[in-house]
Amino acid sequence: MIKRLHHAAYRCRDSEETRKFYEDFLGLKLADALEISSSVAGHDVKLLHTFFKMEDGSFIAFFEVPFMPFEFKIQHDFDLHIALAVDEKVLDDMLERGRKAGIETRGPADHGLVRSIYFRDPNGYVVELAAQTGIPNSEWPLGHAHRVLDAWQQHKAAPQT
């Protein structure tokens, strides 16, 4: 059975630029960096794999592969983003810090259960800081998510008029 997230990994253009955003700006500790010269399949590679630790022990990680082009395609937030949990008191300070640092910064957005702000990291990824404001997921009525999903499936399959 799956216990928790260990890490989510993404490509990055430059490991130091990425470190400045995740460690200096967001406050995540650079916990490990691995220089890798051979892939699991046995191919010669030259890459750096960095890990930034979150309070729960999970990581967000990055691969810098200097000799392999990295062309990030700007996408909508709902196509690709990572949401990191924070206390609500952090949001306003981080929003101001992002704006002062010249980082693409948006929000706050009130989603009912969470209040969020958004940044674009140096690689183009959207990073959401989300503060729980409503009922915790653990207290939702049993079967709630399945009922919403079932209703969605029926609605999207219905002919549009």
Image: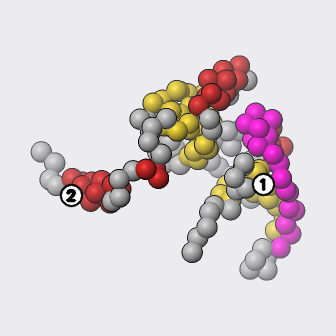
Q: Is residue 6 above or below residue 138?
A: below
The reply, left or right, for residue 108 in relation to residue 16 is left
Kind of element beneath mark 1: strand
Front-lying residue, 79 or 46: 79
Specify the quadrant of the image occupied by residue 98.
top right
Q: Is residue 7 visible?
A: yes
Q: Is residue 66 visible?
A: no
C-alpha span from label 1 to label 2: 41 Å
Q: Residue at x 45, y 37 (%)?
A: 134
From the top left corner, tell me how far across and down residue 45 is, in percent. 81, 68
Q: Residue at x 39, y 50 (%)?
A: 140
Disc 2 residue crowd, few under 14, some 14–19, many 20+, Cα 10 Å? few
From the top left corner, tell me how far across and down residue 6 is, in percent. 68, 62
As for residue 92 lying within the magenta part, the answer is no
Q: Is residue 96 above or below residue 111?
A: above
Location of mark 2 (residue): 154
Q: Earlier in the sequence, mark 1 or mark 2?
A: 1
Specify the quadrant of the image occupied by residue 22.
top right
Q: Residue at x 52, y 26 (%)?
A: 108
The span shown in magenta is 22-38
Q: Residue at x 87, y 62 (%)?
A: 35
Kind of element beneath mark 2: helix
Disc 1 residue crowd, few under 14, some 14–19, many 20+, Cα 10 Å? many
Q: Is residue 41 above or below residue 37?
A: below
Front-lying residue, 117 or 12: 117
Amino acid type shown at disc 1? Phe
Location of mark 1 (residue): 51
Amino acid type shown at disc 2? Gln
As for residue 23 lying within the magenta part, the answer is yes
From the top left corner, tell me how far across and down residue 33 is, in percent. 85, 57
The reply, left or right, for residue 14 in relation to residue 56 is right
From the top left corner, tell me how far across and down residue 160 is, in percent. 16, 48
